[in-house]
Amino acid sequence: MRKVVVLGGGLAGLSAAIYLALKENQVILVEQEPTLGGKASEIVEDGFRFDTGPSVLTMPDVVTGIFQDAGYKCPISFEPLELLSRNIFSSGRVLDVYQDWEKTQEQLDPAEKVSFVQLLKEARKLYVGACETFVFGRAPGILSLFKYAIRYGFRSYPTMKLASLIRSFNPSPDLERIFLRFATYLGANPYLAPAILHNIAWVEFGQGTVFPRGGMYGLVRALEELAVNLRVDIRRSAEVTHLEINKGCISSVVADDQIKCDAVVSSLDIIRTYQLLGWRHRLEQARPSLSGLVVFLAVRGHNPLMSHHTISYPANYRSEFDSIQLGEWPEDPTLYIYLSCRGDSGDAPLGCENWFVMTNAPTVEHSIDEERQTRRVTQLLINRGFLEPEQIIWTKHLGPRHLARMAYRGSIYGNAPDSLLSTLRPNNRVPGISNLALAGGTVFPGGGVPLALLSGKEAARVIEVK
Ligand SMILES: Cc1cc2nc3c(=O)[nH]c(=O)nc-3n(C[C@H](O)[C@H](O)[C@H](O)COP(=O)(O)OP(=O)(O)OC[C@H]3O[C@@H](n4cnc5c(N)ncnc54)[C@H](O)[C@@H]3O)c2cc1C
């Protein structure tokens, strides 16, 4: 039986550990924190429960697929959301986007209706082209990239920016913002992102999103339980500090103690994995993707204007990204507000709500005063008329400083996908180390819950075929 050590107990590490255990390996998962989940953690206090990271779940089949592959019934029930997002603009306009396109279109003027449908069809076309090569299966090699280029090359607008593609459908400024914002799902500046990222709109608006009962952290709990059932040895509060190499192989993982091993899957940020090897990765020089600041508010009362997922846009969407580009906190950012208590009433005490308010943020070296930005975000909620000061029972925040514990510079999605080439995530193998495979949101197929889970599966496969 081979002994394989998995570094990191986030979603990718859990997925890798499960697939490795299914292949009869002895698996040890090493996590630096006392709890698993990584970016997908939770805060529980005074009867309030908050997910700390992901809140929008797409592609639930990827989650159920893991349980099926293990021969278990998926214990999580997924509630499809009819209302995908409520979009509130500085003009006061409220635009609800439903899974049912017709319901969305009822709120649009005739010109917007045309743009909306055309934008969705374009997103579907890009998604269908990209998913085979860039999402499912193996990291693309030269041959598959060549095939993709032959088949979809010009139809994927290789030299076009996302903003230009969206504008070519003559959307109203409100629709334009809704579609531009999807670039931030991969941590990109929407005004620099390549056109191919428009495919993300299809994943949310075309395929829909679900709410997992038990919140997003319920996924972590369920995967952890599955890993334990498969006899994965989980070691918490154990920070890996070094990987020992002997003749082109990792011979042991150094955490609290030295763990001798036959193979390693690292789900850490790729730059961190290279640092543990004593190497430097070229992406250290690349521009990082966006970081984020999440303000958690324990709120008294109920605001009917808020939906499960609400986005409040500022008057000037672009200036938010201009500030971040300069390494500054945006003064008037977009607020993404997630109320998991709308899906699971147990997440807040009776008569109260749990407000998770996320804004884009610069990476950690620029984000010196998170507390000041937290106060600014709280004030914006009041200024935009969403909350009265006396409704706020307490606030907490997690920002780039916290994220930097698990992500290089606190950037959520690795290097910024600012061009077609930089959207390609690094391969799951490490040249020169034959028994190491990489998983996690910074390598193929990429970040976000479903892709991070797929990366774990792929890393387990890569290690097996060596
Ligand atoms: C605020 C926020 C909102 C998000 N929203 C969404 C969303 O709505 N939908 C979506 O799909 N995705 C979202 N994401 C992205 C998604 O959460 C991530 O892509 C995904 O969780 C990444 O999982 P991972 O396992 O690759 O990385 P991580 O979760 O970072 O896991 C890495 C693990 O490794 C551990 N670790 C690091 N260094 C060491 C070490 N030296 N020794 C031992 N352990 C170590 C860390 O503690 C961590 O547990 C969001 C992320 C954030 C931060």
Image (tube, helix red, strand yellow):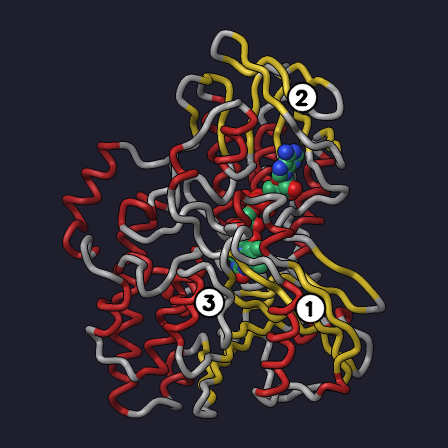
Please give the name of the residue rendered at 49% of the width and 32% of the height, measured from the top-left corner.
Answer: 438
Question: What residue is shown with label 2?
Answer: 254
Please give the name of the residue rendered at 36% of the width and 71% of the height, measured from the top-left corner.
Answer: 179
Q: Can you tell which quarter of the image residue 175 is in?
A: bottom left
Q: As displayed, is residue 426 above or below residue 103?
A: above
The x and y percentages for residue 450 are 50, 50
Q: Nearer the viewer, residue 351 or 374?
A: 374
The x and y percentages for residue 281 are 43, 31
Q: Is residue 172 left or right of residue 384?
A: left
- The three-letter amino acid code for the residue at tag 1 is Phe
Q: Is residue 291 left or right of residue 418?
A: right
Q: As displayed, is residue 391 above or below residue 36?
A: below
SS assignment at label 2: strand
For marks 2 and 3, the one nearer the N-term is: 3
The quadrant in which the C terminus is found is: top left
Q: Nearer the viewer, residue 254 or 75?
A: 254
| Tag 2 near tag 3, CB within 8 Å | no
The CA distance from mark 2 to mark 3 is 43 Å
In the image, the residue with mark 2 has its CB under 8 Å from the nearest atom of ligand 1: no
Please give the name of the residue rendered at 28% of the width and 45% of the height, measured from the top-left corner.
Answer: 421
Question: What residue is shown with label 1?
Answer: 296
Residue 182 seen in render: yes
The x and y percentages for residue 404 are 59, 47
Q: Is residue 125 left or right of residue 215?
A: left
